[in-house]
Image (cartoon, rainbow, N blue to C red):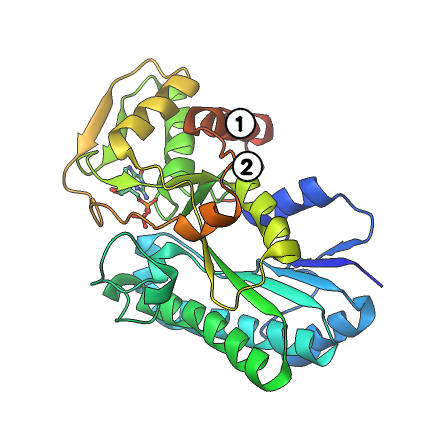
Amino acid sequence: MARYLVTGSAGMLGSSLRRLLGEEGAVYLTREDADLTNFEATAALFRTHKPEYVIHCAAVVGGIGSNSVHSGEYFRHNILINLNVLEAARKTGVKRLISFMSTCVFPDKTEYPLKETNLHNGAPHPSNFGYAYAKRMLEVQSSAYRKEWNCDFIVAIPTNMYGPCDDFALEGGHVIPSLIHRCFLRQQEGADLPAWGSGAPLREFVYVDDIARLALWALEHYREEDPIIFSSGIERSIKELVEIVADKMKFTGKIIWDPTKPDGQFRKPSDTTKLRRYLPDFQFTPLDEGIEKSVEWFKANYPNIRQ
Ligand code: GDP
């Protein structure tokens, strides 16, 4: 019998949880262990391991490019994975389960800062609606299961997460891993570093180990039915970010902003009131420290990185 079962453990958050929890009493599942879109295969794993707590990180994710092209696949995969994992957890009597959305599943037209209570109040951005609706169903399924079967399933909503074991795809990835990878290659070539858009947009970046620590806290202490946003609430500009990455990579070329690439939303600040009510003193990893750790990890693991 396992105390913890982590799905998606080859991913960024799963890997961080593994560093934090260690091997004893925990089971880490990857795609090799089972196809979570298949209910029988998923249920068989749960029957074998009989976990007390489940940290469900498995998902099909990608940047804006990949999301808009594969809206059907992102919808289908995520909805099936979530449906099966939560159902297998219910059937095997899991004590508590935590799953994750992202602030990009919030309504496109909404008020800021983003609040947990506004999750369903409007359609998501058209560029990622397949992914967003599938992820929102995590909250619906968790609360429906709680109502009918008293399942103790909770949902957390991190903002822009980054860190070791990220997906370092050059074009389809998120800004931090893409830039680290591109910067590395450009430095080797002695070329300048292209960055997308104007550099003006603001984002709340959170180091993955902070999310892992918060997930374990929530699993133990968070008793509300509604989701909870995990963020520092500190906005940083993309310009500042690119400069930090270039500095940590010891990049000697110039940064060239490419205005033909999308800026995306200007800002999407989140409301951290609820998190701060529980954890007023929680220390988030400062951005430059988190980037430094991510850069070190990238250099130590290149070329064996996800991309
Ligand atoms: P999201 O916009 O919060 O969904 O996340 P992204 O990580 O894809 O992009 C965040 C911001 O970084 C956007 O304003 C982009 O224009 C900017 N950005 C700058 N350079 C890059 C890059 O190389 N890749 C990506 N994905 N974004 C970049």
Q: Is residue 80 visible?
A: no
Please give the residue where the numbered disc 2 appears in the rendered image. Answer: 164
Beta carbon of the mark 2 residue lies under 8 A of ligand 1:
no
Horizontal relation, residue 148 to residue 70: left or right: right
Image quarter of the N terminus: bottom right
Q: Earlier in the sequence, mark 1 or mark 2?
A: 2
Task: Please provide percent x and percent y for residue 196.
Answer: 23, 37
Residue topped by disc 1: 293
In the rendered image, which quarter is residue 86 located in?
Answer: bottom right
Q: Position of residue 110 (x, y in %)?
A: 22, 62
Q: Quadrant of residue 157?
A: bottom left
Above or below, 162 against 73 in this view is above
- In this view, the residue in front, 101 or 292, is 101
What residue sits 71% from the left and 76% below the top?
Answer: 43
Q: Secondary structure at mark 2?
A: loop
Tell me the kind of residue under disc 2: Pro
Q: Residue at x 47, y 48 (%)?
A: 277
Q: Quadrant of ligand 1?
A: top left
Q: Are marks 1 and 2 in contact (CB under 8 Å)?
A: yes
Residue 299 pos. (x, y %): 54, 25
Q: Is residue 112 left or right of residue 146?
A: left
Q: Residue furthest left?
A: 259
Disc 1 versus disc 2: distance between alpha carbons?
A: 7 Å
Rate crowding at label 1 as few (under 14), some (14 to 19) or many (20 or more) other CA atoms within 10 Å: some
Query: Local crowd at mark 2 within 10 Å, few (<14), some, or many (≥20)?
Result: many
Q: Is residue 78 left or right of residue 71?
A: right
Name, please, the residue furthest toward the right: 1
Outermost residue toward the bottom? 148
> Which residue is drawn at the image coordinates 39% and 66% (left, top)?
131
